[in-house]
Image (tube, grey):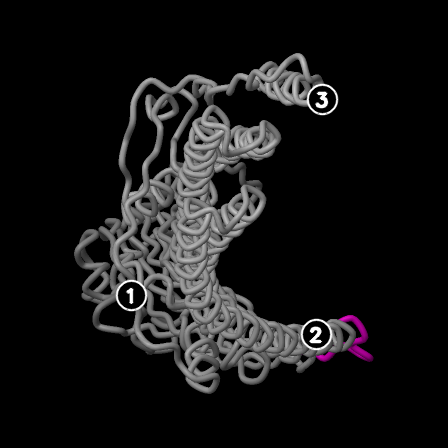
């Protein structure tokens, strides 16, 4: 480009020198337009606005991050629900124990009591999502072999089923940390969804503006090239008239001066086009290896079939009802309310109702009487009593009175199944009801946290009010811009038509000899300026519509964007 500019200046300088010299009446040579090649461009692709928006939304990293945030928020709800999932567990062991005994009352055989035990205790525990109830249900069972001489049953099969409940009566009855976490997670999904919509609207608006800037750059280059062609035509006409002796050489110099300026504008327009094209490609393409980087992009603008411009009240009503950032802010206020509610709940005393309901079972095999145990200990005493009873004429006590077998009820006799039957019969129940009270004195930490949560809630409400004010300003500004852009576009189109008529009229006068090259070039400048203003006004109208749609959350509807896809 610098080389072309130097040639143009050199041509003009040479022309002035020849005009000032009576010995050099020849015309300065005209410098043809030489446009530099587009760097890296090897092909051409035509794109519509929907194509561009679809590509931008598919490949934009911010949209992808917002989509992943939405998936993460959904997983957060599942995580919060998981607290209320029942937990299954338990314990089990096998025991062998040998206990030395120094007394015959210990039931020892050869000075020791041996015991083998197999024990299992499965449990189910959890928390209720409704009233904050905590529960634990366990079932224990065992098989015990014991060689004590006092056993009436061996082996034995003890069983037990127990249900423990802890029910908050004050703090945590209707609201607690786990239920707050679940509600916040659900609102977080809605908030993230609105933020995702806002991200899509923002990126789509950027794509629309970039597309219109490319449209302007393409048409700007066309107008600048058209200006060069008009100047070249005028230069050729001036040359013919100079050769015929009806014009001076200075008229050619004037035209070539304007031609050089127009050529400079072409080079600048080409640079503007390259920048606009690369800006759009950076939004559209997934990586730097995409072949579309090497293609020249051509726009295809459909006729404007937009609906009439709404009134201010209609625009504000739609914005306040549909703007995703406002909805996300409202959800943020609701979340702060939940935080404040939980903090206030923590200031209450802890009063819990506790309950335990259980039933036990037992069964075993009867140990045959061998004369041992209590019978062996008290047998001499029984004999003396019987001797004295004979002397006194009193009936004797039978020896079977010392037998342990007569003291075992029938429902205890059996194996593990009999123990379960005893458990089901509920012969041996346990019921326990109590109250737990915890009253922190002062409770300064909880009260301070409640005060902080209330302040945070007020801050969130204030921020939401500020956002509403910003939306009000945004809607008013974009609506004014849209209305003005309509008027500017109409007047710019009219001005371009009138400038064309003025230029054509000046050309006719020039050919009739009633005008000058200076006036023709002036009208030419006015024509090119009017056309540039028209294409700028057209692009501004498209961008103003995009901004207004963003301000009123109408972008998805107008561009037929299905956010679920």
Q: Earlier in the sequence, mark 1 or mark 3?
A: 3
Residue appearing at x 33%, y 69% in the figure:
359
Residue 216 placement (x, y as % from top left)? 44, 46
Number of other residues with Cα within 10 Å of mark 2, as a class: few under 14, some 14 to 19, many 20 or more: some
The range drawn in magenta is 438-445
Residue appearing at x 55%, y 68% in the figure:
177
Q: Which residue is mark 1?
A: 407
Question: Which one is closest to the eye, mark 2 or mark 1?
Answer: 2
Does residue 296 appear to the left or right of 467 in the view shown? Answer: left
Q: Earlier in the sequence, mark 3 or mark 2?
A: 3
* Closer-to-camera residue (294/11): 11
Number of other residues with Cα within 10 Å of mark 1, as a class: few under 14, some 14 to 19, many 20 or more: few
* Closer-to-camera residue (71/541): 541
Element at label 3: helix
Q: Which residue is mark 2?
A: 459
Assess whether residue 466 is covered by the magenta stretch: no
- The answer to whether any part of residue 549 appears in the image is yes
Look at the magenta stretch and give its main secondary structure.
loop
Question: Which one is closest to the eye, mark 3 or mark 2?
Answer: 3
Q: Which residue is mark 3?
A: 20
Question: Which one is closest to the eye, mark 1 or mark 3?
Answer: 3
């Amino acid at each position: 480009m610098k080389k072309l500019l130097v040639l143009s200046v050199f041509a003009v300088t040479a022309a002035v020198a020849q005009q000032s010299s009576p010995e050099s009446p020849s015309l300065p040579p005209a410098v043809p337009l030489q446009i530099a090649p587009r760097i890296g461009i090897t092909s051409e692709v035509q794109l519509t606005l929907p194509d561009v928006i679809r590509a931008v939304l598919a490949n934009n990293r911010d949209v992808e991050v917002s989509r992943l945030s939405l998936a993460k928020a959904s997983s957060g709800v599942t995580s919060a629900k998981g607290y209320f999932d029942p937990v299954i567990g338990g314990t089990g062991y096998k025991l062998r124990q040998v206990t030395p005994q120094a007394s015959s009352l210990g039931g020892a055989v050869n000075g020791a009591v041996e015991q083998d035990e197999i024990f299992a205790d499965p449990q189910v525990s959890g928390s209720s999502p409704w009233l904050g109830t905590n529960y634990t249900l366990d079932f224990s069972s065992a098989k015990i072999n014991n060689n004590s001489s006092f056993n009436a049953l061996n082996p034995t099969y003890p069983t037990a089923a127990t249900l423990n409940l802890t029910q908050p009566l004050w703090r945590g009855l209707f609201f607690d940390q786990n239920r707050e976490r679940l509600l916040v997670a659900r609102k977080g999904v809605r908030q993230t969804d609105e933020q995702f919509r806002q991200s899509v609207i923002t990126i789509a608006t950027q794509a629309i503006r970039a597309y219109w800037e490319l449209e302007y750059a393409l048409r700007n280059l066309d107008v600048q090239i058209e200006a060069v062609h008009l100047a070249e035509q005028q230069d050729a006409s001036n040359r013919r008239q100079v050769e015929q002796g009806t014009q001076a050489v200075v008229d050619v110099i004037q035209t070539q001066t304007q031609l050089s300026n127009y050529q400079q504008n072409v080079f600048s327009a080409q640079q503007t086009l390259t920048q606009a094209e690369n800006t759009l490609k950076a939004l559209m393409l997934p990586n730097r290896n995409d072949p579309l980087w090497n293609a020249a992009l051509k726009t295809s603008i459909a006729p404007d079939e937009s609906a009439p411009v709404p009134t201010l009240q209609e625009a504000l009503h739609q914005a306040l009802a549909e703007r995703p950032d406002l909805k996300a802010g409202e959800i943020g206020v609701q979340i702060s309310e939940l935080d404040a509610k939980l903090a206030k709940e923590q200031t209450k005393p802890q009063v819990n109702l506790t309950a335990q309901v259980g039933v036990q079972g037992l069964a075993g095999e009867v140990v045959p009487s061998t004369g041992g145990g209590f019978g062996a200990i008290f047998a001499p005493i029984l004999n003396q009593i019987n001797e004295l009873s004979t002397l006194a004429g009193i009936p004797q006590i039978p020896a079977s009175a010392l037998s342990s077998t007569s003291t075992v009820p029938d429902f205890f006799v059996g194996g593990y199944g009999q123990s379960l039957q005893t458990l089901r019969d509920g012969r041996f129940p346990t019921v326990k009801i109590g109250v737990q009270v915890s009253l922190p004195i002062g409770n300064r930490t909880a009260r301070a946290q409640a005060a902080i949560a209330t302040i945070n809630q007020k801050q969130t409400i204030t921020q939401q009010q500020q956002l509403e004010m910003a939306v009000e300003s945004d809607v008013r500004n974009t609506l004014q811009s849209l209305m003005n852009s309509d008027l500017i576009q109409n007047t710019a189109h009219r001005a371009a038509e009138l400038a064309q008529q003025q230029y054509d009229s000046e050309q006719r006068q020039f050919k009739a000899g009633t005008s000058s090259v200076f006036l023709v070039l002036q009208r030419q400048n006015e024509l090119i300026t009017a056309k540039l203003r028209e294409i700028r006004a057209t692009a501004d109208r498209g961008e103003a519509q995009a901004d207004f749609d963003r301000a009123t959350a109408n972008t998805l509807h107008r561009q037929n964007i299905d956010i679920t896809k």
